[in-house]
Amino acid sequence: MLFAILAAALSFVTPPGWHQAKPSSSMRFAEFTLPKAAGDADDAQLIVYYFGKEGAGSIDDNMERWIGQMHQPDGKPSKDVAKRETRTVNGLSVTLLDVSGIYAGGDMGGGAGAHGSGGGTVLARMRAGVVQTPNGPYFLKLTGPAKTVAKWDQAFAQFIASLKFQ
């Protein structure tokens, strides 16, 4: 069953299989666990942040910070392998980032990494984004083992396609 969630005028549909959790800090609006793929040790986590009309920095600042949280095993700069796109979803400008590597960053709330890494060696993947609304930007960040995040690619695409401002 799909559940619609209203986030201060941003609404979206939670894909089947995602587990909603109570946000673990006041900086998080919504928090979801995406169950791990076979063979992975950890689940993935998607967090939706909302900081009010002023947001939390520019789109470029957030993209650079997120890219900086991933390190490449071969030492190459993560910006060289990151994929960024901007599209319109139901009238909203959405800028998305997709980057894999070794996850070395925490979250925006200052907590531990989404899957227990803080300089780990597991190949991870981050899919993040900024959704521009008349009420200010919303920030989305999905992190987890690369195989687990790949397992949820279609569901993540459906989640993004469901974003609406009401």
Image (cartoon, rainbow, N blue to C red):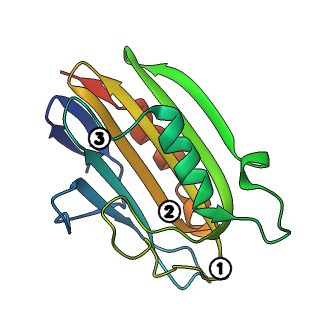
Q: CA distance from mark 3 to mark 1?
A: 30 Å
Residue type for callout 2? Thr
Q: Dot 1 surroundings within 10 Å: few (below 14), some, or many (20 or more)? A: some
**Residue 21 image position (x, y, % from top left):** 22, 66
Of the image marks 2 and 3, the number of the one nearer the N terminus? 3
Residue type for callout 3? Val
Residue type for callout 1? Val
Q: Dot 3 surroundings within 10 Å: few (below 14), some, or many (20 or more)? A: some
Of the image marks 3 and 1, the number of the one nearer the N terminus? 3
Of the image marks 1 and 2, the number of the one nearer the N terminus? 1
Residue at image x 23%, y 31%? 10
Mark 1 sits on what residue? 122
Q: CA distance from mark 1 to mark 2?
A: 12 Å
Please name whichever residue, 86 or 147, is drawn nearer the observer in this view of the structure. 86
**Residue 116 image position (x, y, % from top left):** 46, 82
Q: Quadrant of residue 135?
A: top left
Q: Are marks 2 and 3 in contact (CB under 8 Å)?
A: no
Mark 3 sits on what residue? 13
Mark 2 sits on what residue? 143
